[in-house]
Amino acid sequence: MSEPSTLAARYQSGDLRALARAVTLAEAGLPAARPLLKSARAGGIRSVVVGITGSPGSGKSTLTDALISVLRAQGKRVAVLAVDPSSPYSGGAILGDRIRMLRHHADSGVFVRSLASRGALGGLSARTMAVLALLEGGGFDWIILETVGVGQSEVDVAAACDHTLLVVTPAGGDGVQAFKAGIMEIADVIAVNKSDLPGSSRTVRELTSAQALGWHDEHTWLAPVRKTIASAGEGIESVVEAVLKHRAHLGDAGLQERRRLRAEFEVRSLVQERLLRRARNAGGDLYARVARGELDAEAAADELLSGP
Amino acid sequence: MSEPSTLAARYQSGDLRALARAVTLAEAGLPAARPLLKSARAGGIRSVVVGITGSPGSGKSTLTDALISVLRAQGKRVAVLAVDPSSPYSGGAILGDRIRMLRHHADSGVFVRSLASRGALGGLSARTMAVLALLEGGGFDWIILETVGVGQSEVDVAAACDHTLLVVTPAGGDGVQAFKAGIMEIADVIAVNKSDLPGSSRTVRELTSAQALGWHDEHTWLAPVRKTIASAGEGIESVVEAVLKHRAHLGDAGLQERRRLRAEFEVRSLVQERLLRRARNAGGDLYARVARGELDAEAAADELLSGP
């Protein structure tokens, strides 16, 4: 166990072991992480924070890997946070993580970490946001947040990151499905991965024309659609360019706002966790009383919010 | 405008216009709905509440339609609640709704309603739970909750309903994807729809063997996998049977617990809405201060929970 002050000093000097320890503290929600977090946040915007989302099988992990290689070749330091909030079953993130760990083991410009922590509502947790802040404070040029799992995590990624990269494949009408499912609205950049498969040009066309259908004016950001073959490293530079183009579009005010949204997500998740505790302390019966019509749902909400 | 007392009496007598009005009041969160809700809940468990989930394009709407026909032929009264919390773009629910409206217009045993209300966290809202309770109080034998959209709504459906019916198709390795995405864990019954397409038997096999992989003992419910062709009305009775089998498995205690979970969801959503209001009243700066490292996220959570 290091002294917190020593840990803070080592963390601030960019020591990767100290960062790893800080991340562990933050992930566990331990108070020792709080001063580190504060100093990390006070450092302002230093990292390009990209969230990668897309259905399982679209090749998110492979694309992340390819992004690491391209960014390292450009001399950037890259941190990857792989989060699997959905299920103890689907070990995809953990596996991909280990493979990358091995590959980039000797490279001090790459930091990879898996988080299994699940938010109070099933998506990303407050801890994830804290870890993102620590990575930014650790001086990484790019931070890639890769989630495995469905649902809430996709919405959460958009709240947590500066840029959301949606990965689709030409197969199974993925593009149209993304549009129908409302996912396209959270995408800042779209990669049509596995674009050596048949139908990739059609998928690009469908996505582009779907965008054109929505309301937009000259200030609206229409997510650039890029073909990639992540397994062969093709099209990756073009994705990096598209992300940086979106960054320029956001501007400083836009980036500050994204940071604010991340903080909001973190605070709201913490509030949620505490409310869960209060509900447990109120006795397991609060909700049963509502279910039986004995207590009004509004009255139950009052009770929770006035609780100790 | 009816007098609330008259409305309550008409609602309790099973008047469909009064029900429609009650649903409108509940959806708007108006206090006039509260006595109706209380009496609806006091009536106990009267309906089989089934949530239908699955990726867009899997045929959820068509399957809902087919279920209505089968259940009506069995003399059951059926209410359908179509919810699209994800996006103002994807008008699927509304369209499917209108088609059903036309088809079942003259049938007083079918009640169809669309809700567009979005929860504070993007999924189903507290209002949806209230409407479900009103439909149950309205004496429907079956209530089908059909969601369009991605993500949080899938998790929410499982929290809101007695039985979750997952719809997959043989195309695109849907079954394996559902497994990887952790969706299979919330399914109580699985329909492999469009099973006239190639690969349906393989999909059934994949799903069944994926289930066998997970931990289970003789008390674990393994979701029955049923082939359907909803557009031709094939396999629907078998889905109804599987739902009722799951209902027997839950037993009275299990069903009470599901009701409790629904109430919990409603109360928590209401709490969330109020916290959003508090955060706005605290000034838009609370989260910005956290983002700049001036205020600890934990301290901000304290501030929100102690607010007026």
Image: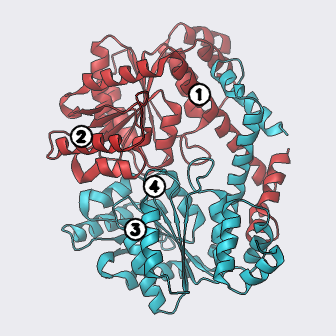
Chain colours: A cyan, B red
Whether callout 1 and callout 2 share a subunit is answered: yes
User: Which mark is in front, 3 or 1?
Assistant: 3
Mark 3 near mark 2, Cβ–Cβ under 8 Å?
no
Whether callout 1 and callout 4 share a subunit is answered: no
Q: Nearer the viewer, residue B7 or A87?
A: A87
- Chain letter for mark 4: A
Q: Which residue is mark 2?
A: B204
Residue A253 can be seen in this image: no
Quick one: SS at disc 1?
helix
| CA separation in Å, label 3 and label 1 | 39 Å
Q: Which residue is mark 3?
A: A60
User: Which mark is in front, 1 or 4?
Assistant: 4
Q: Is residue B54 above or below residue A257?
A: above
Q: Which mark is residue B130?
A: 1
Q: Which residue is mark 4?
A: A149
**Kind of residue indicated by mark 4:** Gly
**Kind of residue indicated by mark 3:** Lys
Mark 1 near mark 2, Cβ–Cβ under 8 Å?
no
Q: Is residue B160 above or below residue A206?
A: above
Neighbourhood count class around disc 3 (C-alpha, 10 Å): few under 14, some 14–19, many 20 upward:
many
**Kind of residue indicated by mark 2:** Val
- x 54%, y 44%: residue: B123
In percent of width and height, residue A306 lies at 83, 37
Q: Nearer the viewer, residue B214 or A160?
A: B214
